[in-house]
Image: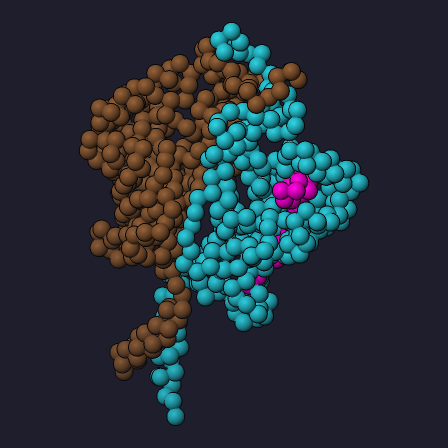
Chain colours: A cyan, B brown
Amino acid sequence: MRQPGSIASIVLGAALCTVVAGASAHDESKYPDWSGQWRRPPGVNNQWDPSKPARQGQAPLTAEYQAIYEANLKDQAAGGQGTDPTYTCIPDGMPRAMNVIFPMEVIILPKTTYMLIEYLSMLRRIYTDGRDWPKDAEPSFMGYSIGKWIDTDGDGRYDLLEVETRNLKGPRAFDASGIPLHADNQTVVKERIYLDKADPNVLRDEVTTIDNALTRPWTVIKNYHRVRDPIWVEAICSEQNEHVRIGKENYMMSADGYLMPAKKDQAPPDLRYFNQTKK
Amino acid sequence: MLRRSLIASLAAAAMLCGPVAAARAHDEPKYPDWSGQWRVTGGNKWDPTKPVGRGQQPPLTPEYQAIFEASLADQEAGGPGNDLRFSCLPAGMPRMMTVIFPMEFVFLPKLTYILFENQMPRRIYTDGREWRKEVEPSFAGYSIGKWIDADGDGRYDVLEIETRNLKGPRAFEPSGLPLHKDDQTVIKERLQLDKANRDVLLNEITTIDDALTRPWTVTKKYHRSRSDVWVENNCTENNPHILIGKEAYYLSADGTLMPAKKGQAPPDLRYFNQARK
């Protein structure tokens, strides 16, 4: 029979253990293992809806924004950039950053989950400390994100991160085809991020975009495949960028370093401020 | 009796705590408190104790001193000199440690991240790894670090870092103070809190580079802010500098191309159908 003194020792031991363990913060065992490098799956290009081939998705655009999109496609077919603003190397912003053109990694800390995306060095901070929405935060391409961890299967370990992102600025498009978001930048992006139960090396992101360019919330499911012990590469958009924007016109750089038209019969830039006799 | 119970309790604690504590990784009390935002003091010059430009008195070889003088002359005439940041190329190492816009540190057991408001992150591997041969050169380089408990109190207080595998072009500061185009730079850093003020972080940075006659050490100081307001700083947004080939131009307020230097020729328009002008 166990003696009362022994029971007391065990109880006191457990109490002491709690005090010691409490001095160590960040219980990693509470969080899922999202370590490593996450890449978009083979065969998926940079389209927003990965379930459809590139440029064949059907965005639920309003009539006004469908017209803008069609004009954009025509401009791109003629050599322009349409409504895809990122050729000047501004960030993709949200939700487009989650196309994960180049890999990303996720760093989980108790109060903040960071997403580091290789392309354009985009960084997301997802605050999981229970804070309220700020009233005065400056709008940004990546927006302001608040998240909440959920233990959906009750095993004592979080497995789902729900995120809401607001406070965005533009211009932004969903992908390189130029599917536009509304100029009012009132976008709200909601995500549910979790590991695939069948394959823990697949991370899923159910992304729902609520935007005034759309007739309804638009949900797509992104999958990312894990690589352990990754090698990271710098993806520097402004290095050898062949696009040159002068005012509202987009030009190109030729292979031999001269300015050239991006579209057929495009006029050259206005050189009124140059002393032309010095040419 | 009481003493025996206490011993038993402690033994029980040891048994119970062992596996539980092992399940909890990342013992934060082992690491220093470098939380918050950090900004450099002393402005955007490389050596914060000296004036920018020639006042830096950099230990350059004669060849690179001449390159530096040519850069200063070009800048005085309105050009960029050797400073290509105007085209939004990354500052790279070591210049990115002149942290005008804030940075923050994120510690994991095997990696320390430095996250910046306006440039790519640094990953500093602290897992004891060897230098890798297959890593592509980059502006931020490849960094291996080591935590040190310098005062023996059981808590790390110094992070030593070595960075290699860099690419260019890079300059130390906006004056265009050059690093060698062979990109064989090695950078060594010692980061620790100022013992007199725990809201000051010191970074002793030594640059070894073939543009220099000797290793060049400067000490940067960063001041802490407990703010968690982060602002996007996108160089490419509304950038008035236009690079065409090797010539830097400027965008006027009305969106028209203009010279950056007096007497600068306009860009060659050979590929345009001039009859359409």
> Closer to the camera, B31 or B165?
B165
- Residue occupying the point 48% across, 14% down: B265
Give left or right: position of B209 versus A18: left
Q: Is residue B104 above or below residue A152?
A: above
Name the dominant secondary structure of the magenta segment.
Answer: loop
| Region of the chain picked out in magenta, as a range | A173-195
* Total numbered badges shown on the rendered structure: 0
Figure quadrant of the C terminus of chain B: top right
Q: Residue furthest right?
A: A63
Q: Is residue A172 above or below residue B275?
A: below
Q: Quadrant of residue B49?
A: top left
Rendered view: B251 above or below A207: above
A74 and B72: which is toward the camera: A74
Q: Name the residue at 52% across, 66% down.
A: A200
**Residue at 21% from the left image edge and 35% from the top image edge:** B215
Q: Position of residue B116 (x, y in %)?
A: 43, 40
Hey, which quadrant is residue B43 in on the image? top left
Horizontal side of residue A140 vs B6, given as left or right? right
Question: Is residue B235 in view?
Answer: no
Furthest residue toward top:
A277
Q: Residue A89, image x and y in percent?
A: 54, 36
The residue lying furthest to the left in this view is B214
User: Which sits in the foreground, A183 or B241?
Assistant: B241
Q: Quadrant of the N terminus of chain B?
A: bottom left
Residue B127 pos. (x, y %): 32, 57
Q: Nearer the viewer, residue A236 or A35?
A: A236
Q: In the image as oriented, which residue stretches furthest toward the bottom? A: A1
